Amino acid sequence: ASVLAEVRKLAPASRPAALQRAEVLHRAGRLTEAIDILAALPTGDPEERVINLIVEMLLRMRRYAEAEELLLNYLHALRQLPSPRRNPGVEGEARELLVRLLFETGRFGRVTREAKALLEADPERLIAHYALGKSLYMQGQTERGLVEINRARQIIGDAPLETLSDLSVIYRRPSSQPADAFLRDVAPQLGLADSGKGRGSTWEDLDGDGRLDLIVGGQEFANVAFLRVGDPQGDAVFREATESLGLGDYDSGYTNLVGDLNGDGRMDVYGIRGGYQSRRDGRDGNVLLLNQGDSGGARPRFRRAGPEHGADDPRQGFGGALADFDGDGDLDIYIVNHNDPNRLLLNDGKAMFRDVSEAAGVAHPGGGQGIAVGDVDGDGDIDVFVANKHHRRIKATGPGSVLHRNDGVGEEGIPQFTEIAQQAGVEGNGNDFAPLLADLDNDGDLDLFVGAFNYWNGKSFISWDGSAGGAHRLYRNDGVDAQGLVRFTDVGEAAGIDRVGGSMGGAVGDLDNDGLQDLYVSMGGPEPGRFEPDLIFRNLGGMRFQEVAADWGVFNPGRAHGITLPDFDGDGDLDVYVPNGAFYPSDGSPNRLYANHGARGRWLRLSLQGPVGNSRALGARVIVEAGELRLLREVRAGHGFCSQDPAELHFGLGDAERYDAIVIRWPDGSVSKLPGGPTNSALTARQPASRGSGGTSPR
């Protein structure tokens, strides 16, 4: 900032001053401003670095088409200069930028040709050696790729590698599926395999036909929405319906939260769009999409609401949740931002929002990378855990993750939160990602899983500050102490989940229907060539877990984000949806939908119907009793990293042929106790108009 202030004092007409100011803005991350300054300069000597600087910034913004057109024209102009005027340094830098552009966009054959030509002129070009080596590897020429990567390492003084697995964490796919594998990828058959660079995923019944539909969000891509159609009792069939729903006219970013936000009985959408971009990079903010379809909801049509609704947010959004945080009967919005303050928007019941973040005590400016909401202390209101990951090139803005305890409503109807992460023992160290709240030991309270995100430096996993990488954490909820503070103990190592790697998403649910909730953890990182297959931790009971992804039939080589667990085919077991994103367009892989074809246990599926304003009863807490099992679930919209599971609750019940009772604590605090019945059933429970017993009906 001080350098920028000095540069501003220089004469506005000074070309060197403009160049220097653009350089400073570039380093400060204010790319759009820097490009505007450079683009406004009169045409200068082709040898100047102006074009190279613009191209470099366009690459950072991944505006590849503009960068390529500008760069190719510039290289052509440089080659037309007479030999005495040609500057090998400027031209070499431009050619290196071309190699980088080709690599980031996945054109590995051209990378090979351009990098070789560049290295003939300048054998010490580090990026050219690296891009050539990785491109040869991506084309199956492993040994030749290793030679080039070692040359790059020698230039910077690092020891040579013996194998490529020393550079990237590479796993080979199992040659065949184990005999007991019961999760099988059916995305290609259903047309769900390639939905853009997937980030978040949301499952909800958008058209009111009783079947789950899907919205996939992607960084710098439009939403892709799929409606399940056809015979409700037949095989699952999905129809791509993005444009007909009105969801395709904006780049979606990361998260789509779905709920009835204006109390008209129809599902609306709140899109959190920022991610690593924000309005500072020329993007719009978050969007509120109200459902203007027919009153029955059979033909949904979403239209963007205006700024008067108060739901816009131009910051770097990385997820959020819908919940009735102030207990007034409608759905509010909590937004997780990255390196910007988080926001809490209170709803007046008609989708008119007011920002109460500061007054509520939740405007924490950490590096938000996911959210988990739930009643962690059992007092009847919704608490919030936000996982913070500091960036290795940005100074830390907070000590770690935050746990906001909801202390009830204060003045002007604003809920009051107290930050207690350190006292509760869940602060972490700035490496946290994609948190999950669930009762993992079936003791009646919510435990906390937090994924660890680590960078890869070519030798080992490292934390944001350069220290050794951290492991996933599992915090056991030990209840509320005598002072009224909830306490957690980190049992990750004893539980067997303390893997070191790069978690980028996750979900929790009982995948094998044995009465214990399992963990799906997606792995990876933004570095090209880094492969870390996803993990599934099977819950063995007693807070002990076993990694079983390959045994259960899952091989996904990393970079998945918004994992969700829908029972999309309605057969009583949880399936797994995996949207595979990548920082570079060349580095992605198809999205996956693992259908569950072999969960052996029995099950119960429960849908709750709440009153106007919260028709899905978000925030309700349910306990199902079956013999010795006492299973706790909560209804939520938004969890982990950019995910929203279906509002319906799934309970695996092992070999129990009957359940004994269902106890529901509704969002308003009223309680219903429902009688037992047969398992392998799908039920709907409606909140009674007055406090007392509710009713159930088969669905």
Image: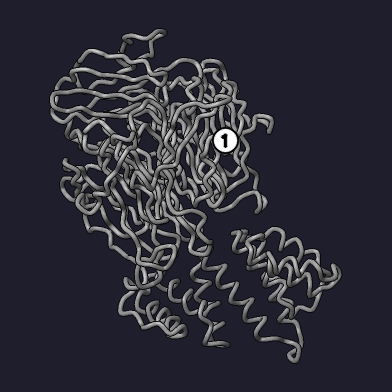
From the image, tell me which residue sits under label 1: 359
Camera-side residue of 545 and 479: 479
Image-quadrant location for residue 520: top left
Image-quadrant location for residue 572: top left
Location of residue 428 with respect to 117 vertically, above or below: above
Left or right, 210 with respect to 550, comes to right
Percent position (x, y) of residue 295? 55, 15
Left or right, 586 with respect to 312, comes to left
Percent position (x, y) of residue 64? 61, 61
Camera-side residue of 139 and 647: 647
Image-quadrant location for residue 289: top right
Camera-side residue of 529 and 29: 29
Asked if residue 365 can be seen in this view, the reply is: yes
Percent position (x, y) of residue 699? 32, 17
Left or right, 35 with respect to 254, comes to right
Q: Secondary structure at mark 1?
A: helix
Farthest residue in the bottom direction?
84
Q: Amino acid at mark 1?
A: Ala
Asked if residue 511 can be seen in this view, the reply is: no
The N terminus lies in which quarter of the figure?
A: bottom right
Location of residue 48 with respect to 454 vertically, above or below: below
Camera-side residue of 22 and 298: 22
Figure colour scheme: one colour
Q: Residues within 10 Å of mark 1 (few under 14, many from 20)?
A: some
Q: Name the residue rendered at 31%, 57% in the picture.
A: 471
